[in-house]
Image (spheres, rainbow, N blue to C red):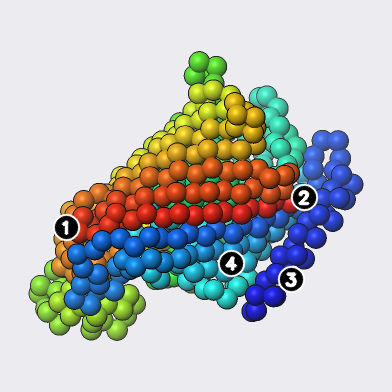
């Protein structure tokens, strides 16, 4: 599709959203919003400065971040359409468009990909797809009445503080799990993927981050319990999903508690996940090469990442039904009217390959958001964040032999944790438009002290209707 067509689509999306909003009041009754429609447009651009590197794509392993200056961008447009099908039931349909140019073909960064909008199979040509189509049904069990504000994928109304919510269909796992008020919205908060969710949370999803599945949520006043099962991809980091949900799947369980600390609201969440997928273990790939040198990265005819390193192991020789598990902590806390802080941390068993998210086995992220009341810009926001990621010893050994995974593999490695800092300022231009300046610095990219550090400058333009 031509760029002009993308511009026409965006204009139609905005005009449609404005028209729907104008008639929105006609669709409401006094208690519940019967339907709503929202739209968004986001453009994110980054420039990576050149950086020192002792080697790049050593010995034919192809997953290094290119050390020369590069530019990257994403353009997305989304429509959020919601309908109350019957009392307690909501249906949502979310079509989306993306055009993108990643850095180094999306290689060379572990958990620190600078733009969380980037997709693994994206292209410069605008691509249109359905991101979500799901049903949400709520059964109330009493308690206090809780107001739900109208928004994207949320009809305005009220619900019981004690309730059960069932969500089924096509959506993203992080629409429900591991949410955080201060880190999780790439269009209005941090841009780096470290802050979208736990970097080590290898949640089941296709290459765009979506899946099909079922999730249940039980709310009892200040407590919530969530559980869900979703489809994973047939091959790691690819679009087609494996529909054999009783054989291959991603399960997650989360417990949440709301609290007040010195009069300020906060939440604590504990998340566990267990993936059962056709994936390779690092040790098994190494053992296969050592037992038979012909089983190297250049000879596998099943799914692989196209390495030219004849002396390297490859996960394609080790894929079978394996289990991957992880446990994470998620904290959010307001400390003043305009200031909130957050922390996430997760550790996985680190035995098997990344299947859907980033090349990370353990991760932490923390930071703060500050609103602009004190300098007379109440709708502006400053964000400061820090993240650090680690690999398991078997993952490091695999990379040290020249192996690659979906995102990283320089051909050799001098291991050190990957560290990322991000600073941004969001300026609210009017009711519908925001502009962001962003700075990021990644130290030891792809966990390799022989390369980097990497400095990135970015801008974001975001519109909502």
**88, above or below 331, in the image:** below
Task: Tell me the element at label 2.
Answer: strand
Which label's residue is closer to the chain start, 3 or 4?
A: 3
For label 2, the crowd category at 10 Å Cα-Cα, with few meaning under 14, some 14 to 19 and many 20 or more, is: many
Task: Tell me the element at label 1.
Answer: loop
Residue corresponding to mark 2: 36
Residue corresponding to mark 4: 98
Report the quarter where the N terminus lies.
bottom right
Which callout, 4 or 2, points to the residue nearer the camera?
4
Of residues 286 and 391, the one nearer the viewer is 391
**361, above or below 58, in the image:** above
The residue sitting at the right extreme is 26
Of residues 286 and 387, the one nearer the viewer is 387
Which label's residue is closer to the chain start, 4 or 2?
A: 2
Residue corresponding to mark 1: 414
Residue 322 shown left or right of residue 43 in the figure: left
Distance from disc 4 to disc 2, alpha carbons, whole Å, reads 23 Å
Residue corresponding to mark 3: 8
Residue 440 shown left or right of residue 122 in the figure: left
For label 4, the crowd category at 10 Å Cα-Cα, with few meaning under 14, some 14 to 19 and many 20 or more, is: many
**Which residue does the image show at 31% across and 47% down from the upper left?**
419
Task: Tell me the element at label 3.
Answer: helix
């Amino acid at each position: 599709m031509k760029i002009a067509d993308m511009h026409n689509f965006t204009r139609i999306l905005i005009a449609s959203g404005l028209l729907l909003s104008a008639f929105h009041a006609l669709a409401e009754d006094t208690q519940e919003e019967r339907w709503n429609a929202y739209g968004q447009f986001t453009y994110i651009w980054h420039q990576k400065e050149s950086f020192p590197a002792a080697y790049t794509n050593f010995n034919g392993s192809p997953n290094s971040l290119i050390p020369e200056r590069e530019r990257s961008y994403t353009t997305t447009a989304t429509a959020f359409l919601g309908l109350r099908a019957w009392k307690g039931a909501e249906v949502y349909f979310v079509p989306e468009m993306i055009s993108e140019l990643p850095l180094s073909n999306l290689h060379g960064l572990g958990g620190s990909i600078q733009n969380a909008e980037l997709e693994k199979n994206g292209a410069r040509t605008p691509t249109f797809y359905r991101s979500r189509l799901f049903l949400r049904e709520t059964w109330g069990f009493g308690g206090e009445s809780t107001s739900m504000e109208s928004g994207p994928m949320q009809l305005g109304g009220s619900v019981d503080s004690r309730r059960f919510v069932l969500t089924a269909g096509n959506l993203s796992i992080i629409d429900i799990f591991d949410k955080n008020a201060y880190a999780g919205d790439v269009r209005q908060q941090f841009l780096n993927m470290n802050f979208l969710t736990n970097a080590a949370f290898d949640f089941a999803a296709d290459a765009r981050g979506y899946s099909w599945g079922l999730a249940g949520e039980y709310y009892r006043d200040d407590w919530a319990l969530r559980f869900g099962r979703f489809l994973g991809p047939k091959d790691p980091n690819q679009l087609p999903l494996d529909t054999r949900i009783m054989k291959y799947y991603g399960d997650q369980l989360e417990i949440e508690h709301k609290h007040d600390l010195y009069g300020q609201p906060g939440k604590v969440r504990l998340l566990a996940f267990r993936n059962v997928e056709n994936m390779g273990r690092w040790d098994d790939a190494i053992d296969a090469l050592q037992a038979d040198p012909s089983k190297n990265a250049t000879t596998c005819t099943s799914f692989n990442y196209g390495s030219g390193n004849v002396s390297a192991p490859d996960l394609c020789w080790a894929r079978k039904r394996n289990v991957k598990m992880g446990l994470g902590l998620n904290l959010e806390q307001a400390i003043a009217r305009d200031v909130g802080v957050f922390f996430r941390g997760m550790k996985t068993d680190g035995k098997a390959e990344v299947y859907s998210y980033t090349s990370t086995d353990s991760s932490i992220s923390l930071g703060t958001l500050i609103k602009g009341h004190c300098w007379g810009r109440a709708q502006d926001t400053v964000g400061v964040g820090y993240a650090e990621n680690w690999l398991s010893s078997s993952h490091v050994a695999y990379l040290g032999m020249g192996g690659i995974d979906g995102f990283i593999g320089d051909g050799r490695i001098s291991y050190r944790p990957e560290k990322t800092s991000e600073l941004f300022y969001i300026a609210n231009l009017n009711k519908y438009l925001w502009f962001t300046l962003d700075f990021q610095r990644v130290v030891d990219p792809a966990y390799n002290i022989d390369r980097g550090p990497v400095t990135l400058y970015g801008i974001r333009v975001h519109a909502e209707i």
